[in-house]
């Protein structure tokens, strides 16, 4: 029986010529060698880059950690939480500045100034947040901060000026100096309400008047909004019950005996 030529030719069409197989193997080996060559070049490039720009621990930390959080900034949309009900400064303009810290702190700063002149009085109410843990809490630093707010670059040394009694309790006074009309600073820390009250006043011609002016600022300080802070609201409610009232103007000289017995040895009202 004769075989069919078409059947005999069919298997030959499915076979790959040895020359083509050899060419394919060479192409595959070339691609592998090319990839290895490119990888070696990349590795050499990384080594050269690292040698020229060493990645120090500081650089790693800077790349891994987020940018430092901003400090105090103005809170334009916040409403004032405190006010001084009355202050006898004819022609003076009152202003309020509210600062917030990303870690939760808030400062309400109340100032009074005559047109075209530096402020004559200021009071700051600070409700600290987590940022207070990193701040220096010593009394000398607080006094230095008050002096710097009063007279930046003045360099006047603050001196203790005794104590006064207020509706918030005993308040420390400091003779700040730095101006022809000497100014008094004050500071009061109320831990139960997480509140720090500080400020200064340049009102009054005599020592008793300047002391009485500081007492009047504190006596007339009122709470506008506690913002849901029960401890703060209770502190001001109790303070109002202890409020004795004060006198301004020339009568402060007579009222000085009610506020203090002497310049450096005050007689405080109430029982402690």
Image (cartoon, helix red, strand yellow):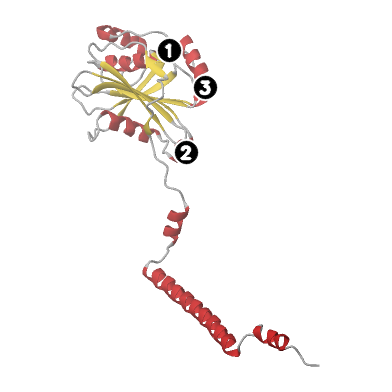
Q: CA distance from mark 2 to mark 1?
A: 34 Å
Left or right of 139? Residue 23 is right
Q: From the top left corner, tell me how far across and down residue 97 is, in percent.
A: 34, 25
> Can you see residue 22?
yes
Residue occupied by mark 3: 229
Q: Is residue 245 above or below residue 1?
A: above
Could you tell me which secondary element the residue under label 1 belongs to?
loop
The mark that comes first in sequence, 2 or 3, is: 2
Q: Is residue 10 above or below residue 216?
A: below
Left or right of 271? Residue 85 is left
Q: From the top left corner, tell me how far across and down residue 257 is, in percent.
A: 33, 10
The answer to which image quadrant residue 70 occupies is top left
Dot label at residue 133:
2
Q: Report the residue at 60% width, 88% height from top.
A: 17
Left or right of 42? Residue 96 is left
Residue occupied by mark 1: 269
The mark that comes first in sequence, 1 or 3, is: 3
Could you tell me which secondary element the residue under label 3 belongs to?
loop
Residue found farthest to the front: 1
């Amino acid at each position: 029986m004769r075989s069919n030529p078409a059947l005999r030719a069919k298997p030959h069409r499915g076979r790959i010529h040895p020359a083509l197989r050899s060419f394919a193997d060479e192409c595959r080996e070339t691609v592998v060698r090319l990839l290895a060559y490119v990888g070696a070049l990349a590795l050499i490039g990384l080594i050269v880059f690292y040698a020229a720009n060493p990645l120090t621990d500081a650089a790693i930390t800077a790349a891994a950690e987020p940018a430092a959080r901003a400090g105090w900034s103005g809170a334009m949309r916040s409403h004032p939480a405190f006010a001084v009900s009355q202050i006898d400064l004819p022609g003076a303009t009152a202003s309020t500045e509210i600062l917030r810290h990303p870690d939760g702190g808030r400062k309400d700063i109340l100032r009074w100034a005559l047109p075209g002149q530096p402020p004559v009085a200021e009071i700051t109410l600070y409700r600290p947040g987590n940022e207070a843990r990193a701040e220096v809490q010593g009394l000398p630093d607080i006094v230095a901060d008050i002096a710097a707010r009063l007279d930046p670059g003045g360099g006047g040394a603050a001196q203790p000026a005794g104590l006064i009694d207020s509706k918030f309790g005993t308040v420390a006074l400091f003779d700040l100096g730095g101006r022809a009309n000497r100014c008094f600073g004050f500071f009061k820390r109320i831990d139960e309400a997480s509140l720090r009250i500080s400020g200064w006043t340049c009102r009054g011609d005599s020592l008793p008047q300047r002391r009485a002016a500081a007492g009047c600022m504190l006596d007339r300080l009122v709470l506008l909004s506690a913002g849901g802070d029960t401890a703060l609201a209770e502190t001001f409610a109790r303070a109002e019950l202890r409020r004795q009232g004060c006198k301004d103007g020339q009568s402060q000289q007579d009222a000085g005996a009610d506020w203090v017995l002497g310049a450096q040895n005050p007689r405080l009202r109430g029982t402690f």
